[in-house]
Amino acid sequence: MSETVTLSCDDLESLMFAALVNVNTSAENARPVARALLAAEIDGRKGHGLSRIPSYSGQVSSGKCDGQARPEIMKELPGSLMIDVKSGFFYPAIDMALELLPAKTSANGIAAVGFHNSHHCGVLGHHVEKIADQGLIAIVMGNTPQAMAPWGGTKPIYGTQPLAFASPRKNELPLVMDMALTQVARGNIMTAKQAGKPIPEGWATDAKGNPTTDPEVALAEGVLLPAGGIKGAALGLMVEILSAPLTGSALSTEASSFFTTEGEPPCTGQFLLAIDPEAFSGNAHFLERVENIMESILSQEGARLPGGRREQMRKDAAENGLSVPAKLVEEVKGIAVQ
């Protein structure tokens, strides 16, 4: 088993912040990035946490990601925004959107944001959870570099196509559903590679369509398999259309890797939709009926809700810190002082 070390949440965030700033990321960009990666670690989403610092830092150093870029509003209508991420980090852009979106949603009943020329979007569930904390329903999705073949095909056309949904609840943390439309997010395969571990059979195939458990083969030349078979592949197409053509961003087949330093900026896109329940059935009715659904689920022995472990994991991290791979910590420390 790989050796681990335990760091406090503050120390881990500070380490990631220092590494990003040291490779020429502005402090105002590095802070939301480090905060987002810390949140991923806290919620057990290791593939979107500390393990991203080496690739993020390498891409800033090579110019593939602009660590100094500040997002700008390209177009604004009463119920919509288009934000140019400018080949920089997505996290400052989503922060900008979250400041403006609630008022637009309340005024119009529904509002949307498109993100143009973007980068890796991290744990999408965290972004929609923040919107649901304000009493709104939210759906967000993004395209990623090609990884998944269309149903019946053998060559990748779509990315892992992350998709997340959040709904407010009465006196509870929001309900959050966050998934890749492949069997697993590519970040999980990168984490297995960094740990020197095989991946489960059924996650990916090699270039010839044969099942593989080698994470290097899966990342370099393989094809990730869709979750839910033909239905997952169809949803991947939906995400591609809403994330790329609608936002004027690169198609998955055109986007460069989120993990390597080679190539042009990936220029992927994301699409976010927020809905105010008050504009439809009304907040009180909506929240009551959501709880009716939750009660029906939880009344069944063994049934659980998506994301149900978040509260305990966050409490544990605050009290006990986070266990992270020692080798990875040393690598990130090296980036922070190089």
Image (cartoon, rainbow, N blue to C red):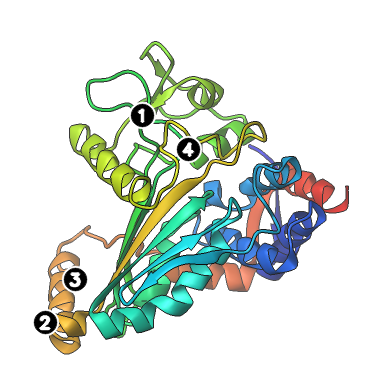
Residue at image x 39%, y 52%? Answer: 247
**Tag 3 residue:** 294
The answer to which quarter of the image holds residue 63 is top right
Residue at image x 43%, y 71%? Answer: 311
**Tag 1 residue:** 157
Mark closest to the chain's N terminus, 2 or 1: 1
Gap between marks 2 and 3, in whole Å? Answer: 18 Å
Which callout, 2 or 4, points to the residue nearer the camera?
2
**Tag 2 residue:** 281
Q: Position of residue 165 (x, y in %)?
A: 30, 62
Which callout, 2 or 1, points to the residue nearer the camera?
1
Which callout, 4 or 1, points to the residue nearer the camera?
1
Residue at image x 57%, y 65%? Answer: 92
For the residue marked with disc 3, what is the amino acid? Met
Gap between marks 4 and 3, in whole Å? Answer: 31 Å
For the residue marked with disc 4, what is the amino acid? Arg
Q: Secondary structure at mark 1?
A: loop
Query: In the image, is 4 to the left or to the right of 176?
Result: right
Q: Do the numbered discs 2 and 4 sit on residues whose CB atoms are within 8 Å?
A: no
For the residue marked with disc 1, what is the amino acid? Ile
For the residue marked with disc 2, what is the amino acid? Ser
Which callout, 3 or 1, points to the residue nearer the camera?
1
Q: Secondary structure at mark 2?
A: loop
Q: Position of residue 260 (x, y in %)?
A: 63, 34
**Tag 4 residue:** 186
Gap between marks 2 and 4, in whole Å? Answer: 39 Å
Sort mark 3 into few (<14), some (14-19) or many (20+) by Cα contacts within 10 Å. some
